Amino acid sequence: MINSGEILSTIDMISQQHLDVRTITMGISLRDCAHPDAARCCDRIYDKITRYAADLVKTGEAIESEFGIPIVNKRISVTPIALVAESSETEDYAPFAAALDRAAHETGVNFIGGYSALVQKGMTVGDEKLLRSIPQALAETELVCSSVNVASTKAGINMDAVALMGRIIRQAAERTADNGGMACAKLVVFANAVEDNPFMAGAFHGPGEAECVINVGVSGPGVVHHALQSCKGESFDVVAETIKKTAFRITRVGQLVAQEAARRLNVPFGIVDLSLAPTPAIGDSVADILEEIGLSTVGSHGTTAALAMLNDAVKKGGVMASSHVGGLSGAFIPVSEDAGMIAAVKKGALTIEKLEAMTCVCSVGLDMIAVPGDTPAETLSAIIADEAAIGMINNKTTAVRIIPAPGKTVGDTVDFGGLLGMAPVMPVNGGDASLFIARGGRIPAPIHSLRN
């Protein structure tokens, strides 16, 4: 059992090195909220969320105050709404998003995730209704986040869903053109999505999860960067060991918070996600870590190797600190949320193609990337397909959160504020992907998926 004395060694990490618990996320099953009447289903959704999460924010704030550990976000994830809404006799799914948004506002959380569908092998009628409603749902709500899983190692890539998501992303951007295409910042397209992810915008409460759980996502790029400053000139063996020991300390803080929150809320503890999640703040950057390892700038040759070592060492340290590590757990490389990544893009050192290579060895994928507003939907779909292929072949989670910024072109910037940060608009390859995307169907699962 962890006690509060274990956090004494983390005081400097918290006060000087940007250590925080990025999120306490309560996962809630909504499967018992299904009802043929859509209005009744929405009422059930609202009532259950507000009942289970009534004390979530208050509890998080109390732990934050008592232990002196910053807890940046309190969030909720729910059963993918496509699974819940499908039983309702309606063509209009927007009220389900509205119910989630009302519940999020009532409980005081920062975001609610789970306006989602799992379509890696095919789409049901309900799945397609939800997908087509995403632009409206995200444009008309404030706190709702959406995710769609279009591929898996076991099923392959659903290219019909990939094609549809390119169009949906364009529509979502157009519906929120007055604030830079903000809806797209709340929409993630996954391959191999995990069921216990506490981070937005991709969090949902998977069908294999319990009735209600507490998942915690920690952070700490600044802590790792600081630790590596004592390793100048040392070998990669020393660097990896230093990262591993630092990740252990970070994860112990997350374990403490997760268990304490679960105890106070009388909800089972789920997992600690030990991802290094950067912020736009100076000194809280994954790019800074990579450059501290020896790169002249992130994006230069050697970046993928450095990131691979970082990601592996973080996982090795984290699994020693908690018996229940889950979620995504690794290093995030969002562009808009990382000051070092932004600087590298502005210098021309970091491109979408290099970011794609980096996603082979890190957590998630192409994250918070702004591209010109006139980028064709087929190009967006092709980017999703490439990233899904990396996830499918490598049996890992990958994702795309991309913003075709309305009215913007290469060299412009889009400012989303807060943790979402500022995104420089990046160029995309000008090749025409329309014939490729128009084929539809499924890209079959790889041979190594046959493991039974």
Image (cartoon, rainbow, N blue to C red):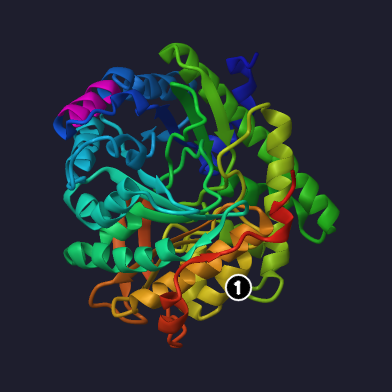
Left or right: 114 with respect to 230?
left
Is residue 275 something that shows in the picture? yes
The residue under the point 85% across, 58% down is 235
Q: Is residue 48 magenta?
A: yes
The spot of residue 81 in percent (x, y) is: 33, 39
Q: Residues within 10 Å of mark 1 (few under 14, many from 20)?
A: many
**Image quadrant in which the N terminus is located:** top right
Is residue 114 something that shows in the picture? no
The residue closer to the viewer here, 355 or 163, is: 163
The residue closer to the viewer here, 221 or 216, is: 216
Main SS of the magenta segment?
helix
The residue under the point 34% across, 79% down is 376
- Classify 238 as above or below 24: below
The spot of residue 365 in percent (x, y) is: 53, 60
Query: Amino acid type of disc 1?
Result: Gly
Label 1 element class: loop
The residue under the point 59% across, 65% down is 389
The stretch of residues the image draws in magenta is: 40-49
- Classify 328 as above or below 434: above
The spot of residue 321 in percent (x, y) is: 69, 29
The residue under the point 52% across, 30% down is 208
| Disc 1 target residue | 299
